[in-house]
């Protein structure tokens, strides 16, 4: 099996890191960003040989008071302490199903912890081990930008025809906007049904969807699953006047896609697909729908994180798979299915972790658990009541979709 974890050594170059690089490294803070700000307190050293035992001891001391959630993209060193693993919405629902847990420690990113806070009781406290663990996609749509977009739609005379559908990978503010305007939330698993529901809310010939914030999931679902054409989709760019669109373009469109994307899935290219087919004859290419449309079109299979896992579980022995999603998950799947004689490789030659997801490491988890065990509530994620009200409404609409 190919080693999908090897990276080129990093040279000590005489360069100045950008503000974004400093933020991702935890050396700066951006309070206006969905990523949040860096953690207070002194973290244990990553070289501490007792980190695993310290995490185990703190978790044992907390007992049923703590429930640890681990997203599929987390590091192995963190995922070993998760009570449940899954995608963002599954984890939020799992948290809501454990009302006896006083503390929900979410090993994921900021918007996921917000969703958990929205769905859990007021007595439960959601903790994010590193407040700077965010999502670049969620950051690509701010409440101010989306409000301005709605003004543009209103001026174009189409707002009353539009139903917003927001991907789970969005901030609580965007979910609340969606709830206020009669829309729903979707995951990569139920995006097709969410779009069908949205179009059912308007006259068939006039209905439109504003899809936030991932353009690729919206485009792929509309074209692959609903039979639309690429011409039915327009791209709203929040950094251009009127989104870079004319009123006529907005009136003619069925799907108004927000100009956002996943920085990990956006890296995969058709060249990646062609290259892996040349290197591994007979390989099955399986990608996440957050990938670009041309990558999805070139793949053999397309599906959510849960779909990817189930597809590999059902795959026959001896089969070969190239997976286009986050590397932590791909590496974990490669190790898991090697014993079943299934070859699993990363789609791209270039190693690419989700940098913000990877901020949740063992030192941060130990610090959070030990703080809670000592009676100190740290890094609480708390959505304000007004935002929670409408965000929950949007989430409940999704749950009500058959």
Image: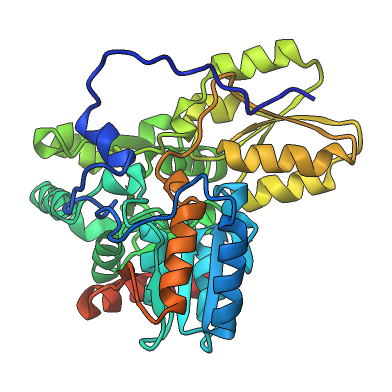
In which quadrant will I find the N terminus?
Answer: top right
Residue for point 38% across, 88% down? 123
- Closer to the camera in the image, 241 or 265: 265
- Can residue 13 be seen here? The reply is yes
Residue for point 25% across, 48% down? 141
Percent from the top left, x then y, of residue 36? 26, 55
Q: Name the side, left or right, on which 388 lies relative to 69.
A: left
- Closer to the camera in the image, 327 or 269: 327
Give the image quarter of residue 397.
bottom left
Percent from the top left, x then y, of residue 305? 61, 48
- Closer to the camera in the image, 391 or 341: 341
In which quadrant will I find the C terminus?
Answer: bottom right
Q: Name the side, left or right, on which 333 lies relative to 211.
A: right
- Can residue 402 be seen here? The reply is no
Percent from the top left, x then y, of residue 29? 20, 48
Residue for point 56% across, 30% down? 296
- Closer to the camera in the image, 54 or 115: 54
Q: Work out whether 383 lies above or below 44.
A: below
Q: Work out whether 43 lies above or below 103.
A: above
Give the image quarter of residue 334.
top right
């Amino acid at each position: 099996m190919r080693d999908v974890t090897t990276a080129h050594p990093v040279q000590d170059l005489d360069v100045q890191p950008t503000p974004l690089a400093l933020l991702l490294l935890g050396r700066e803070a951006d309070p206006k960003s969905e990523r949040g700000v860096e953690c207070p307190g002194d973290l244990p050293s990553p070289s501490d040989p007792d980190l695993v035992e310290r995490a185990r001891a703190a978790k044992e001391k907390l007992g049923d008071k703590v429930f640890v959630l681990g997203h599929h993209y987390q590091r192995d060193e963190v995922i070993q302490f998760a009570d449940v693993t899954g995608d963002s919405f599954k984890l939020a629902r799992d948290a809501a199903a454990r009302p006896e847990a006083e503390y929900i420690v979410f090993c994921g990113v900021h918007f996921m912890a917000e969703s958990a806070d929205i769905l859990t009781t007021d007595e439960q406290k959601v903790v994010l081990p590193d407040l700077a663990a965010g999502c670049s996609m969620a950051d690509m749509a701010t409440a101010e930008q989306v409000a301005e977009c709605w003004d543009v739609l209103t001026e174009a005379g189409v707002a009353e025809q539009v139903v917003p559908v927001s991907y789970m990978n969005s901030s609580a503010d965007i979910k609340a906007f969606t709830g206020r305007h009669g829309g729903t939330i979707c995951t990569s698993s139920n995006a097709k049904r969410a779009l069908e529901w949205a179009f059912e809310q308007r006259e068939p010939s006039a209905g439109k969807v504003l899809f936030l914030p991932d353009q690729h999931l919206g485009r792929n679902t509309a074209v692959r699953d609903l039979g639309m054409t690429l011409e039915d989709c327009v791209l709203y760019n929040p950094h251009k006047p009127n989104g870079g669109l004319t009123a006529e373009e907005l009136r003619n469109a069925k799907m108004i896609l927000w100009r956002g994307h996943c920085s990990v899935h956006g890296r995969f290219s058709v060249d990646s697909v062609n290259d892996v087919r040349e290197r591994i004859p007979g390989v099955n290419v399986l990608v996440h729908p957050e990938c670009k449309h041309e990558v999805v079109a070139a793949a053999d299979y397309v599906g959510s994180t849960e779909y990817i896992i189930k597809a590999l579980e059902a795959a026959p022995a001896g089969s070969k798979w190239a997976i286009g999603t986050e590397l932590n998950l791909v590496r974990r799947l490669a190790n898991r299915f090697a014993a079943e004689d299934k070859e699993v490789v990363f789609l791209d030659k270039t190693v690419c972790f989700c940098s913000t997801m990877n901020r949740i490491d063992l030192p941060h988890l130990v610090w959070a658990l030990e703080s809670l065990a000592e009676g100190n509530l740290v890094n609480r994620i708390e959505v304000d009541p007004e935002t929670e009200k409408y965000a929950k409404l949007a989430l409940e609409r999704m749950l009500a979709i058959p």
